Image (cartoon, helix red, strand yellow):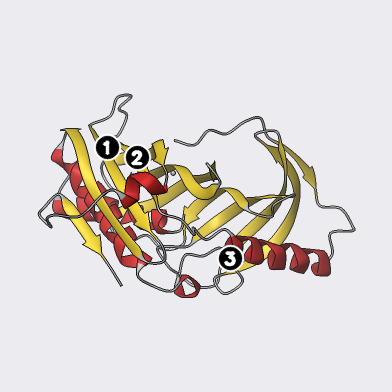
Amino acid sequence: MNLGTSTGLLKIGLLSAFLCSFALGQQSRSPASPSATASSLASIIEGMERAQSDVRPQVAYQLIREYRLFGAKSSSSDSEVVAEVDFRPPSSKRYNIQTRSGSSRGEQIVRRILDHEVEASTKPAETHTAAVNSENYDFTYLGEAVLDNQPCYLLGLKPKRKDKDLISGQAWVDKRSLLVRHIEGEVAKTPSWWLKTVRVKLAFAYLEGTWLQTNMEAVADVRFLGPHTLTSRVLDYRGTDVVASRIPVRSGPHFVERKH
């Protein structure tokens, strides 16, 4: 893969800022009923936006994430990276690469992903261009579904603009909490000519009381080379005490911190 292709794949990771292979249970879907009026859809959207605002992290935490990069027609990963990510509200995030193996391209991609997360963490939540809200999307009511044994509203997502951080597809919204549990679809704008399409699947769940992205799968159809897949999953969640005990002592090539 040449530099142009690699750069395109790096930008797949921009999606993880709002939000990582996902654990998807048995799904069922029922068609939209006559009672699914515009007013009921508006109520779902309003509740969803309020729920997302209410679950913004209020305490420090640390995630241990595993990333894997698969080449075209490859059943085993070309590279694997494990990173730890610390977050201190409201807007301090840093990361450290713990281990890496295989192709160096995997580490390059992960660093771009995490650099983007660090940058995004310094911006007000309401300015995030990837948020699942009415500023960024037009929604349609598609019916109801069951995801991981949880009843959900199934909403269609139509981005209001061509943006590499937005997804044209569907969202599964938990009927009880009105939080987005799962999103899948195609990136509204591919970040590079080398990428014909980028299809993503994103999963979210509570981890010890904090609502976070837990899994991601991004499949990029690379011109002349075929599909390449990037996955990530949370291996461990650590609470406030772990993050509070960590004092930054350097800012070398394997360490990033931003504070505001």
Q: Which residue is mark 3?
A: 53
Question: What's the residue type where badge 1 is placed?
Answer: Val
Instruction: Determine whether 185 is above or below 70 in the image.
Output: below
Q: Residue at x 30, y 66 (%)?
A: 119
- The answer to which image quadrant residue 164 occupies is bottom left
Q: Earlier in the sequence, mark 1 or mark 2?
A: 2
Q: Visible in this render: residue 18? A: yes
Q: Which mark is residue 82?
A: 1
Residue 238 rendering spot, x and y as whole percentages: 40, 41
Q: Badges 1 and 2: C-beta atoms under 8 Å apart?
A: yes
Query: Quadrant of the image for the N terminus?
Result: top left
Question: What's the residue type where badge 2 is placed?
Answer: Arg
Q: Which residue is mark 2?
A: 65
Q: Earlier in the sequence, mark 3 or mark 1?
A: 3
Q: Residue at x 45, y 70 (%)?
A: 129
Q: Nearer the viewer, residue 142 or 149?
A: 149
Q: Residues within 10 Å of mark 3 (few under 14, many from 20)?
A: few
Residue 228 rendering spot, x and y as whole percentages: 32, 40
